[in-house]
Image (spheres, helix red, strand yellow):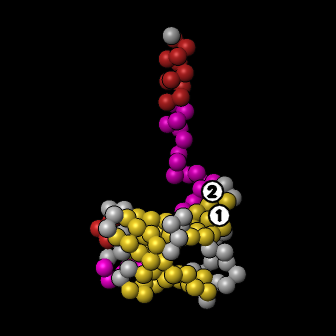
Amino acid sequence: MRYRVFIILASVFLASCYDADRNEGFDITRGEAVNSRSGHEAYIVETKSYGDYQTQVLIRYRGGQCGSGVANADGIYHNLILSWINDETLEITKPRSLELNQNASGSKVQCGEYVVDIVIKNA
């Protein structure tokens, strides 16, 4: 019993020494949001996790109750351009050579009553 208590206390102590804000193996950069007139917000997130770089396009729907991953690509600094064609259609302009993978739902993403069409075009 004393051994278990020691292990638990040692684990709590060691965990309190870990500074999550100083984890140099992980980094997130969020780009500026592009808003539709209806209140949806699209933005680019670039992440680094122990040498693996990833770029993602995300949407936060009107009201902020939910969001969707729209597309992703390996690497960072891809010069993607986000723009709303209309209130429910997001256009992503990408370099011709970039392979951009869409969400599993393809060219439509949905959260409850909100549906957004995704158009990907080459620069």
The reply, left or right, for residue 17 in relation to residue 97 is left
Residue 41, magenta (yes or no): no
Res. 120 image quadrant: bottom right
User: Is residue 43 something that shows in the picture?
Assistant: no
- In the depicted structure, whether residue 110 falls above or below residue 51: below
Classed neighbour count for the residue bearing mark 2: other residues with Cα under 10 Å, few (<14), some (14–19), many (≥20): few
The spot of residue 53 in percent (x, y) is 65, 64
- Residue assigned mark 1: 53
Residue 23, magenta (yes or no): yes
Res. 36 image quadrant: bottom left
Q: Residue at x 49, y 17 (%)?
A: 5
- In the depicted structure, whether residue 35 falls above or below residue 53: below
- In the depicted structure, whether residue 73 falls above or below residue 93: above
Q: Residue at x 56, y 52 (%)?
A: 22
Callout 2 secondary element: strand
- Residue in the foreground of this view, choosing between 19 and 117: 117
Q: Are marks 1 and 2 in contact (CB under 8 Å)?
A: no
Q: Which segment is the magenta one? A: 13-38
The spot of residue 10 in percent (x, y) is 54, 25
Res. 112 image quadrant: bottom left
The spot of residue 59 in percent (x, y) is 43, 70
C-alpha span from label 1 to label 2: 7 Å
> What residue type is disc 1 on?
Tyr
Q: Residue at x 67, y 78 (%)?
A: 98
Q: Residue at x 50, y 66 (%)?
A: 105
Tally of numbered discs: 2
> What residue type is disc 2 on?
Ser
The reply, left or right, for residue 65 in relation to residue 73 is left
- Residue assigned mark 2: 49
The spot of residue 68 in percent (x, y) is 45, 65
